[in-house]
């Protein structure tokens, strides 16, 4: 099993996570090729080598029209008087991009100045345009990236927007993203989702998250660190404050970790293959970095090598079509598996047992989805250990076109299976039966 471990001893921000994942990505050049051709005017992304406390890593640079927001250089240890720049949201919301993590919270910005030290550039970048959550989702859905990446990025933004609306007591539709910050954060979110798509880990384990401490001055007033949005996002996640009186975990970083994590724990037993270090721009007494460790599961053969949650509910008052629609919604939301079983309920009523298998970290989200999409008023939960084979996808060339094959290996077993969608596509294009393409693919393995 391919395991990705993310060590967040100095919190998490979008740029640091991107840089760390880039360090373990199999094809980093593909990442830059995709990200720098998103069709977002003026956006350019690069990474430069960086060293923190003797550790070599990467530091991301997200430029818009050649400008990158840089934190003001102020001495460490000053009073926490940072005025959060309203780059992402108007007064009723507060998501951050990578710059928020790098700012020392020891200085003050003028409210709604919007130039952040680059007044000469304000005319074409730091405007007063704003995007709603719906606007952001529409922009993401139009990006030339794989469908899986678009879906994941929209889901991450949904987590951020929900946390912000709860923090400020506003309706979700009233959360507005400031133009420059929105573009900046889109790059962070889409970039991280793209890298996860390219790395394709079978399991993501995230360490307890260092969120920082102290206070931060915003347009709402002086808020505690971690800010309310981060607290909302990380409900149920192990976090700690530590002695560093700075904001270390941003809403963007928190949402990405919450979405992709299968579990929050210390580093599991694994055989390390690659390590990536994503560096922040600030200097601390300790290395300001997020570490990504990619390797294979080292659990002894013969024992479970993963976890999942099984959610189930009894349904006796829904049509087959409605149950089918619910299954599709669960799969679209990222369920590991969804299936139904015929059962008999009280008074001999025929019914259906709907079961959803999901990642441990996603259990609450899928329970809520079951309540929303079905007529049930109760959902049962069962925490499971599970046995899984290591999986990888590779294209196989056939006379009818390329077919993706899923290879699975482990516990002394090797398997290969052509992907259904590709077989159907090739069979329809060639006008031959499904079984013909399927068998031909197996011959060419």
Image (cartoon, rainbow, N blue to C red):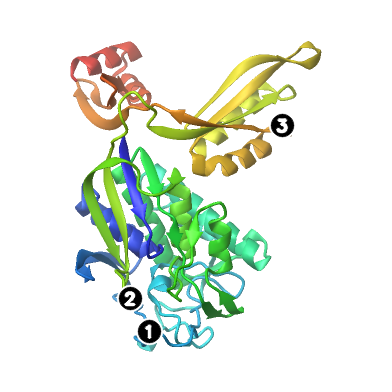
Q: How many tags in the picture? A: 3
Say above or below: 130 vs 413: below
Q: Residues within 10 Å of mark 1 (few under 14, many from 20)?
A: some
Single out the mark in the foreground, 3 or 1. 1
User: Decide: marks 3, 1 in contact (CB < 8 A)?
Assistant: no
Residue 272 visible in this rendered orientation of the protein: yes
The residue that mark 3 highlights is 376
User: Decide: marks 1, 2 in contact (CB < 8 A)?
Assistant: yes
Which numbered tag is attached to residue 284?
A: 2
Q: Could you say which quadrant of the image residue 423 lies in?
A: top left
Residue displayed at 40% across by 43% down: 148
Tell me where residue 3 appears, x and y as whole percent: 32, 41
Say above or below: 347 vs 158: above
Tell which circle, 3 or 1, labels the residue nearer the N-terminal end: 1
Q: Quadrant of the N terminus?
A: top left
Q: Is residue 427 left or right of residue 134?
A: left
Tell me where residue 368 appears, x and y as whole percent: 64, 42
The residue that mark 1 highlights is 76
Determine the CA span between mark 3 and mark 1.
Answer: 54 Å
Residue displayed at 45% across by 65% down: 249
Disc 2 element:
loop
Q: Quadrant of the C terminus?
A: top left
Q: Residues within 10 Å of mark 2 (few under 14, many from 20)?
A: few
Q: Nearer the viewer, residue 202 or 88?
A: 202
């Amino acid at each position: 099993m391919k395991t990705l471990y993310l060590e967040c001893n100095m919190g998490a921000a979008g740029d640091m996570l991107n840089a760390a994942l880039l360090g373990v990505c199999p094809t980093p050049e593909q990442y830059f090729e995709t990200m720098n051709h998103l069709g977002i005017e003026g956006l350019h992304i690069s990474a430069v080598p960086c060293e923190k406390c003797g550790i070599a890593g990467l530091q991301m640079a997200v430029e818009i029209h050649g400008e990158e927001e840089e934190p003001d250089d102020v001495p460490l240890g000053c009073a926490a008087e940072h005025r959060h720049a309203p780059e992402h949201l108007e007064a009723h919301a507060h998501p951050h991009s990578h710059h928020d993590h790098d700012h020392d919270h020891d200085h003050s910005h003028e409210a709604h100045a919007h130039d952040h030290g680059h007044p000469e550039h304000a005319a074409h970048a730091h405007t007063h345009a704003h995007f709603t959550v719906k606007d952001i989702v529409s922009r993401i859905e139009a990006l030339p990236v794989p469908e899986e990446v678009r879906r994941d990025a929209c889901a991450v933004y949904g987590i951020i927007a929900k946390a912000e609306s709860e923090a400020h007591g506003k309706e979700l539709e009233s959360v507005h993203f400031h133009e420059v910050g929105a573009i900046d954060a889109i790059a962070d979110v889409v970039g991280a989702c793209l890298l996860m798509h390219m790395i394709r880990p079978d399991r993501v384990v995230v360490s307890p998250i260092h969120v920082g401490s102290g206070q931060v001055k915003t347009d709402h007033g002086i808020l505690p660190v971690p800010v309310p949005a981060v607290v909302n996002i990380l409900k149920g996640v192990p976090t700690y404050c530590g002695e560093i009186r700075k904001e270390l975990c941003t809403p963007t970083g928190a949402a990405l970790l919450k979405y992709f994590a299968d579990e929050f724990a210390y580093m599991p037993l694994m055989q390390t293959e690659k390590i990536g270090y994503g560096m922040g721009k600030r200097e601390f007494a300790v290395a300001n970095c997020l570490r990504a460790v990619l390797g294979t599961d080292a659990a002894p053969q013969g024992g479970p090598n993963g976890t999942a949650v099984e959610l189930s509910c009894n349904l006796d008052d829904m049509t087959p079509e409605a149950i089918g629609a619910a299954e599709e919604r669960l799969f679209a939301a990222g369920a590991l598996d969804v299936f139904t079983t015929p059962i008999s309920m009280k008074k001999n009523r025929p019914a259906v047992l709907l079961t959803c298998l999901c990642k441990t970290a996603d259990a609450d989200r899928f329970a809520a989805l079951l309540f929303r999409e079905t007529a049930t008023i109760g959902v049962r939960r069962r925490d499971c250990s599970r046995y899984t084979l290591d999986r990888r996808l590779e294209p196989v060339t056939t006379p009818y076109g390329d077919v993706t094959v899923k290879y699975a290996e482990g516990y002394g077993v090797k398997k290969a299976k052509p992907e259904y969608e590709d077989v159907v596509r090739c069979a329809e294009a060639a006008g031959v039966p499904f079984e013909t393409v399927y068998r031909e693919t197996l011959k060419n393995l």
